[in-house]
Image (spheres, rainbow, N blue to C red):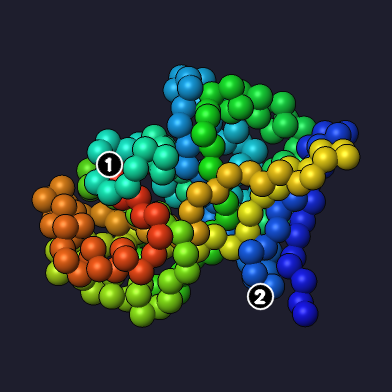
Amino acid sequence: MKALEEITCRVSKKRAVIIRSTDANVSLSNEVFAINWFNTKNRSLYNFYNLLAARSVYKVGARPIFKGEITKKLIGNSDQHREMLLIVKYPSVASFKSLLDNLYFKLISVFRIKAVQDFNFGFSSKNDLSFNKTKDKSKIYIIHHYQGKVDHVWLQEMINLASKYKVHLFYSGSISSRLYVKDKKKEDKTIPCMLDGVLVWYADTEEDITSFVVDKTYKNLLTQVANSYVGILKRSL
């Protein structure tokens, strides 16, 4: 039986971070998208950290493709809710390891730890679908994250329904690797990642988005996955 791929990053003398694939068929050498889903304790400190981290992130070939803040919850409960979504594209998991190995990045990560809370993180692989790339911050965006696996038919039904309401797919991915913290003489601790899949949609108006979400077909598709959360995002990047 084929083993799960994993990469170990030493972040201190006593602590390591293990990145492990979720499936034996997943290669950690492929392009991945880091899903950051979190709350902030200090927004100014978080923004300062982003300024400091940008140089290191770009140096390893990574690029942030989306950042947005939840302005309205449409579906889900408080346990699934977070304030911020950040999606960063990496050439591979190895490039993320290079980031964690960087001494400067290790030092400034103290600011991130102090600035955020309820942090969820996982690497997603992009689903085999057509996406509509845009940097338009005036569009109305929503995130839908869920637990469970979906197939191409389910995703295509979502896209077909969205087209009726002039809603476009910005990103769709499934979690393909997760992170674990390993301290000496302790069991591996999983870094929280409450979702298995994520979709980001956008439209010209909130009315279009709302009509899409309340459609009976949309609600039926949600019954085929677990713990769906849907919220409107104000895009900042």
Q: Secondary structure at mark 2?
A: loop
Q: x%, y% of residue 211?
A: 13, 57
Residue 128 in the image: above or below residue 68:
below
Q: Which mark is residue 32?
A: none
Q: Would residue 17 be seen by someone viewing this image from the given angle?
A: no
Q: In the figure, 226 relative to 143: above or below?
A: below
Quarter of the image for the N terminus: give it: bottom right
Going 58% across and 44% down the picture, which residue do you hit? 192
Residue corresponding to mark 1: 73
Compared to 103, does 144 lie above or below? below
> As rendered, which of 175 and 108 lies closer to the eye?
175
Total labels: the figure holds 2
Residue drawn where x is 14% and y is 69% of the image:
164
| Direction from residue 70 to residue 10 in the image, left or right | right
Side of 94 where 151 appears, left or right = left
The answer to whether 117 is drawn above or below residue 125 in the figure is above
Viewer-proximal residue among 137 and 200: 200
Q: Is residue 177 left or right of residue 222?
A: right
Instruction: Give the amino acid type for the residue marked by disc 2 in the picture.
Output: Asn
Give the left or right position of residue 110, taking residue 153 as reference.
Answer: right
- Per the image, the residue denoted by label 2 is 25
Label 2: how many Cα within 10 Å (few below 14, some 14–19, many 20+): few
Q: Which residue is at 50% across, 49% downward?
A: 194
Secondary element at tag 1: strand
The residue sitting at 63% across, 59% down in the picture is: 177
Q: Which of the two residues, 174 or 109, is positioned nearer the viewer here?
A: 174
Instruction: Pick the quarter of the image with the C terminus.
Output: top left
On the image, the x and y values in percent for residue 187 come to 79, 45
CA distance separating discs 1 and 2: 35 Å
